[in-house]
Structures are given as C-alpha cells and as structure tokens.
Amino acid sequence: MRTEISRKIMRGIALALGGSGNEFEGNIAGDPFRVVRLIGYPPVLKESDVEPERMGCGAHTDYGLLGLVNQDENVSAIEAMNNSGEWISAPPIPGATLCILGDMLKILSNGLYNPALHQIINASPKYRVSAVYFYETNYEEPIEALDICVQKSGGKKKIDTAIYGDYLVAKLKKAYPF
C-alpha cells in the first residue's frame, strides 16, 4: 500500500514538473528499493542530565526519493529548517502521513525540489515511536537530472549523477562509522 501511495505522489511530482505521469518509473524507480524503519526515541526526563537537543536524530536529509512517516499522536518531535534557517516543528496530525522529500529527488529535479533538512528531538516525557517507509530509486541505476528539469532550471545540469546504492552505502558509513 505504501508503495502505491509513493508512486502516486511521484506521479503528481512528475506532472507538476511538466513531465509525463510515469516519469519516475522504468529505470529510475520501476523496481524501487524500499525500506521500513521503526524507530523508538526514549523520553527525556526532567531530572535527566541529558539535554533534549541530544535526544533523537541529528540534522539530516533523507537519501532517496521520499519518506512517509507515521508519527505518534500528541508527541511532536520532527523539526524542519525553514528558508530563514529556523527550526520549525512538524506536529503530528491525527490520521495524516508526513511526506519528506529526499536527496535523489533533488538530483532528478536538478534542484527544483530540495529535501528539507530535518531533525528529531523527543523533548516529551513520553517514549516516541515513528514508522518510516522509505521509497527509493532503483538500487543500481545511475540517477541524473531529468531533461525536463534541466530545461526548467536554466538549461544546465547542476547536480552530479549518483548511483543510489553507492550513495546510500557512503551515507550510512558516514553516519555509522563502525
């Protein structure tokens, strides 16, 4: 179900960019790499020595096309940086799914769509759980700016080509240097 929702979102993005509804299918995401992560964030207790800024997940962008996040109701923890450089909260909306754009969409759109820098800070006294479905490009396919996006953004390719699998492994090695 999440794959079909993701495909529909990607069709909408393709149409908004002026392309065909299946612009992201085929070699780009016809056989997408998919990951589901259940992530738990412990509460910050008032008597704790741990600062709330240190609980959760630090500032980052997601690696693939998009992430769909189901958040705990009544526990706000996701913050995104706005264009003024300020962190703004993305409080959960009951029944809603948060959609986060990723780095591969930035490459494909030649920078017309940029992933939001975001972080997770659980400053509540409740344990927080998020379920995230990551919809990615084909694992071994070279990902580069679509021609329609190059034309819409000045006629020059602004972002280098990436192979998603290599990009993912490099990001994970940097985040988890074991």
Image: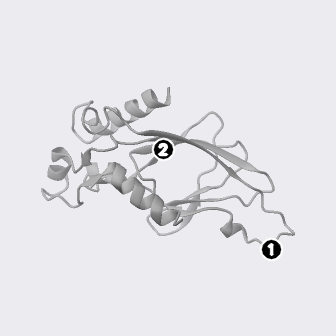
Q: Earlier in the sequence, mark 1 or mark 2?
A: 1
Q: Residue at x 48, y 69 (%)?
A: 85
Residue 49 bears which disc, if any?
1
Q: Position of residue 89 (x, y in %)?
A: 60, 57
Mark 2 lies on residue: 67
Residue 14 lies left or right of residue 170; in this view the side is: left
Q: Position of residue 168 (x, y in %)?
A: 40, 54
Residue 160 lies left or right of residue 61; in this view the side is: left
Helix, strand or loop at label 1? It is loop
Q: Position of residue 130 (x, y in %)?
A: 64, 45
Q: Residue at x 67, y 69 (%)?
A: 54
Q: Quadrant of the C terminus?
A: bottom right
> What amino acid does circle 2 point to?
Gly
Q: CA distance from mark 1 to mark 2?
A: 32 Å
In the picture, residue 96 is in which quadrant? Answer: top right
Q: Residue at x 15, y 58 (%)?
A: 154
